[in-house]
Amino acid sequence: MNQSNNTQQPNQSINLPSADVRIKICGITRQQDAEAAIACGADALGFVFYEKSKRAVTIATLDWLHTLPPFVQLTALFVNPEADWVSSVITGLPIDVLQFHGVEPEPFCRQFGKRYIKAVPMENKSAQDAMQFMAGYPSAGSFLLDNYGEQEIGGSGTQFDWSQVPDAIGKPLVIAGGLTPDNVQPVISQVKPYAVDVSSGVESSPGIKDKEKIARFVTAVKSAI
């Protein structure tokens, strides 16, 4: 990437040409779905450690994670967890990145010695609201913008207003919320994110992924302009 662009647009160093947009398949509950996502070209997999989710998993149900290829990023998603629970997960499983989807304060998120993604609730939020929220998490490795509020944690299958994505945040930006094989290209063209995150948009039912939909999603991302 040409570093000369960095002085003109601060976020050019973190956003990528569409062919290089990273793909995260979230809400994985089954080994066969993880393997299918990897075979289709996913860069990262997400696992939801939140018992109220339809896609909830536990340490015991993911005892197969160590069999996955080492170059696929494994992300553990939490919602207002106890610190002991997070520590247990990262001790018991080969987790690379943490993702916090609740109201966890910044000191809590950074205490585990792992890179972390902070989810930004975009339901009824403006770009200015998002910037103010992100300013409270200077230690975050990246931010994930999703269409959720106090009653939802993601995976709702609904979009937010992409025009409210803030510019030049200085860190990798991940877009989630209602993405599907049919609508992911417009958001890539409009927002030019570092990565896109999909869950319900590649499922046959909550927690059960559809390999054909995953393949279509990956193809759409890779061919976006």
Image: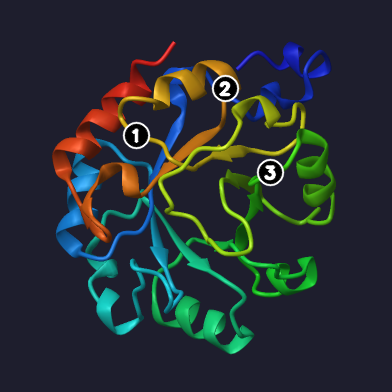
Quote the CA–CA distance across marks 1 and 2: 16 Å
Tell me the residue that label 3 is attached to.
124
Q: Is residue 163 left or right of residue 52?
A: right
Q: Residues within 10 Å of mark 2 (few under 14, many from 20)?
A: many
Which residue shows up at 69% across the image and 30% down it? 164
Q: Is 168 located above or below residue 71 in the figure?
A: above
Quote the CA–CA distance across marks 3 and 2: 22 Å
Tell me whether the residue at label 3 lies in contact with that at label 2, contact meaning CB atoms closer than 8 angstroms: no
Q: Position of residue 190 (x, y in %)?
A: 57, 18
Q: Is 17 located above or below residue 50 in the figure?
A: above
Q: Quadrant of the C terminus?
A: top left
Viewer-proximal residue among 105 and 163: 163
Which residue shows up at 44% across the image and 66% down it? 95
Q: Position of residue 123 (x, y in %)?
A: 63, 47
Tell me the residue that label 1 is attached to.
180
Viewer-proximal residue among 178 and 43: 178
Q: Give the image quarter of residue 192.
A: top right
Which residue shows up at 77% across the image and 17% down it? 9
Q: Is residue 137 left or right of residue 158?
A: right
**Circle 1 SS class:** loop
**Mark seen at residue 192:** 2
Q: Earlier in the sequence, mark 1 or mark 3?
A: 3
